[in-house]
Amino acid sequence: MAMGPVTRAEKQVGLFTALYVIGFTLWFFAIGNFEFVIYVVTMLILIGLVATSLRKVEYPPKLLWALTLWGLLHMAGGGVPVNGSVLYTLELIPFVSDGEMTILKYDQVVHFYGFGVTAWLLWQIMTHTFPVLKGTKTAFALPALGAMGLGAVNEIIEFSAVLMVPDTNVGGYINTALDLVFNAAGALFAMGLVTRFNGADDGKKAP
């Protein structure tokens, strides 16, 4: 079945995304950062999934811009050099500074934001497909849990990068655990906002 016409906003998001993905991909090859080439492939798959479902779900432009911003933050995290490493390792606010147990880093902010956006995306898919769920506890819980699950998949991808590419910036057990914590926190925070501003229109109480 042919896809319907692409909106102006969708074209703008698509062009912006294509420009930075191409730019960072060329940069990763130039500096020999093959770890992030793996992430580029993963991101292209995700972009394809969103693109092919545009007319099925009708993602609002704000959500599409939030998704592409996450992609840009991710590419910048692995491609922008900072203090002899990359942006992902940058400590933003020294709440805790003890080796891997360091809070708050750029990496953690991106995990919080990214999987918050993921929860919003899952909420949009769920409530568009099943409008009766809008404003229910189910529409809060399942997208949050789904985002946490996808966060775990992301950690599996990072583990694969560790196995295939030497000298990655992925980190160890504590880093993985902190990533999962920030994924969960971002998902719960986002769903709190989404359900607060996108509750049921019929005034019914959530079951």
Image (spheres, rainbow, N blue to C red):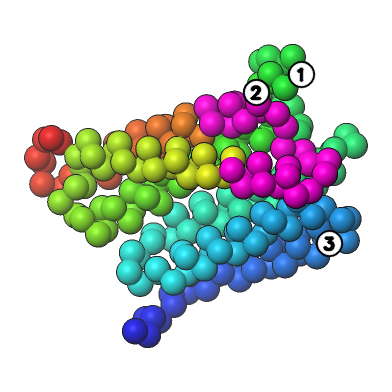
The answer to whether residue 131 is magenta is: no
- What quarter of the picture does the N terminus occupy? bottom left
The residue most toward the front is: 163
The range drawn in magenta is 156-181
The answer to whether residue 162 is magenta is: yes
> Within the image, what quadrant is residue 81 found in?
top right
Measured in 3D between alpha carbons, the distance from the residue under mark 1 to the one under mark 2, in whole angstroms, is: 10 Å
Q: Residue at x 47, y 69 (%)?
A: 51
The kind of residue on which mark 2 rests is: Ile
Name the mark on residue 99: 1
Q: Residue at x 73, y 53 (%)?
A: 36
> Within the image, what quadrant is residue 86 found in?
top right
- What quarter of the picture does the C terminus occupy? top left
Side of 138 where 96 appears, left or right: right
Q: Is residue 102 above or below residue 84?
A: above
Looking at the rendered structure, the number of numbered marks drawn on it comes to 3
The kind of residue on which mark 1 rests is: Gly
Side of 40 where 47 appears, left or right: left
For mark 3, does the 10 Å Cα neighbourhood hold few (<14), some (14 to 19), or many (20 or more) residues?
few
| Residue that label 3 marks | 29
Give the mark, 2 or 3, whose residue is nearer the N terminus: 3
Give the mark, 3 or 1, whose residue is nearer the N terminus: 3
| Residue that label 2 marks | 174
Q: Residue at x 52, y 27 (%)?
A: 181
Side of 76 where 184 appears, left or right: left
Secondary structure found at label 2: helix
Residue 70 coordinates in the image, percent (x, y):
58, 49
For mark 2, does the 10 Å Cα neighbourhood hold few (<14), some (14 to 19), or many (20 or more) residues?
few
Residue 84 in sight here: yes
Residue 138 coordinates in the image, percent (x, y):
23, 39
